[in-house]
Image (tube, grey):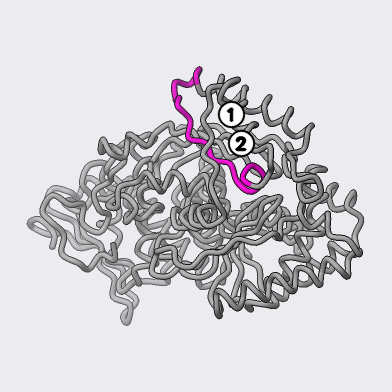
Amino acid sequence: MDGTAEAPADDWGPFGRPLFEDPSARALSRVGVVDVGSNSVRLVVFDGAARSPAYFFNEKVMCGLGAGLADTGRLNAQGKVRAMAAIRRFQLLAEAMGITPLTAVATAAMREAEDGPAFRDEILRETGLRLWVIDGDEEARLSAQGVLLGWPGAYGLVCDIGGSSMELAELRDGRVGKRLTSPLGPLRLETVKGGRKAVKAHIKAVMGDLRERLGPQPDRLFLVGGSWRAIARIDMARRGYPLAVLHEYRMSRRSMSETIAYIKETPLDEIRARTGLGEARAALVPLASLVLAELARTFKPRDIAISSYGIREGMLFEQMPQRLRDRDPLIEACRFSEAKDARLPGFGKKLFEFISPLFKPASSERLRILKAACLLHDVSWRAHPDYRHEVCFDNATRANLGGLTHTERVFIGVALLHRYKNSRAGSRFEPLFELLTEKTLREAEILGKAMRFGAMFSVEAPENMGRLKWYPKKKILELRLAKGAEGLFGEVAEARFLSLATAMEAEPKVLRLRNKPN
């Protein structure tokens, strides 16, 4: 997908043929997954582009099945009542949506409790839902596959923390390697006797054993699980971070250490008021922060990334054919959005081809972002014209998209803002602009103004009506008009062409040709 390889005649060139309408991909629409964890029970229903699915339905109940398990060996009694009620509701909802049978997994609490098998049978009898109780190795594998759904080709160490356990899985070359499970969930740690000092010593001993078995893991650390996301949200609040999207959020080890110190020193009520965390989730944060501190000290990752994708997404990934797994989730999702919402589905590809001469040479990473922006350039056209630029920016920065860093989100947002508005001065989004360098902001503006010109120059095939040429050394931006296309270059088109040239600090030139441009 780098735009350089030869493509079959029936392919879509650098975009790749979208697969969301293929029967094998459409079979993955409206897939419902239930995750019965030690701390929460959740139903997620996926829909949309199968390679980058949206959450059609997402509901979580904090049940605490694993509370007290280490002491009693049994599931928490009140947790069982709450879990049964949640599962009964989820099953009824699934029947109403027409998505039964649900795929359901249960993790540490259910597999370790002596009454786990009996409760699983009760669930089947009362609700009709059949639970797949997975071991720690399988839990680690599925969590890592969830990361792969959002990060194709990811490499590093995946750490999934639940209520009763913590799993580690190695990713190399886009595949899951070694994986281990451990008793480092915060509900389990609550039962360690001897206070904070004893808990820290226990965590250090277990983590040292994991390090011996896994070996060095100096690359990226991917954090999966509600407790990790809660810590990331606290890190965002402490730093005053302007983009409240947890997926792909990055923390340095230094920032993480400062946040852990902040958690130790700050009352939980104050943290909850500042972050909006629920009481049950916030109660687990202090113990989870001790695990994270030791995890970072032990493995010394080069950086830390939050993944909102985990077991549930890993179960969806499990059902994908390999050719779908190999696709770029960002491009697939943007193609799906264009097909569903744009005025002229398919025009995004033509727009990309029209403006691409302005961005040569560009890396494969940059090209995919340019493609994504072109595919999304018109999906918000139904918004009020006075607010269309704002809706575009919000959609780009807050959409549920995989394979997209925070800076890339803001880059696409700025480009789409300029697709509909000439200036960004005085925008309410200015705090987010600070995530980009001045150079990158300017590149986003140029992309937006190129799309703004190309989208209205010709509504059919702009590349047949004209060609853009960019001479960077001479700083000349040239538009070559085909014979018969002069009428398309009216006052508004000329104004937008001049605005693009100004953004590029270029001299604008218009050539009128006698035939089709080349």
Q: Residue at x 35, y 46 (%)?
A: 320
Residue 303 left/right relative to 200: left
Q: Position of residue 103 (x, y in %)?
A: 48, 35
For this orientation, the residue located farthest to the front is: 114
- Quarter holding the N terminus is bottom left
228, above or below 206, in the image: above
Of residues 55 and 206, the one nearer the viewer is 206
Q: Residue at (56%, 71%) from the top-left corner?
A: 437
Check residue 104 for magenta coloring: yes
Q: CA distance from mark 2 to mark 1?
A: 6 Å
Q: Quadrant of residue 326?
A: bottom left
Q: Is residue 374 above or below residue 518?
A: above
Which percent across, then down, holds residue 16?
Answer: 25, 53
Residue pointed to by mark 1: 121
Q: Please name the amino acid that badge 1 sits on.
A: Asp
Number of the label disc, if any, that sits on residue 117: 2
Q: Nearer the viewer, residue 72 or 410?
A: 72
Asked if residue 57 shows in the view, the reply is yes
Q: Quadrant of residue 40?
A: top right
Classify residue 236 as left or right of residue 511. right
* Residues shaded magenta: 95-111
Q: Nearer the viewer, residue 234 or 178?
A: 178
Q: Which mark is residue 244?
A: none
Compared with residue 52, is residue 249 higher up or lower down, i.e. above or below?
Answer: below
Direction left: furthest residue: 515
Q: Quadrant of the C terminus?
A: bottom left
Residue 466 falls inside the magenta stretch: no
Q: Amino acid at mark 2?
A: Pro
Residue 38 point in image, percent of width and height: 68, 44
Number of residues whose C-alpha sits closer than 10 Å to that of mark 2, classed few (under 14), some (14–19) or many (20 or more): some
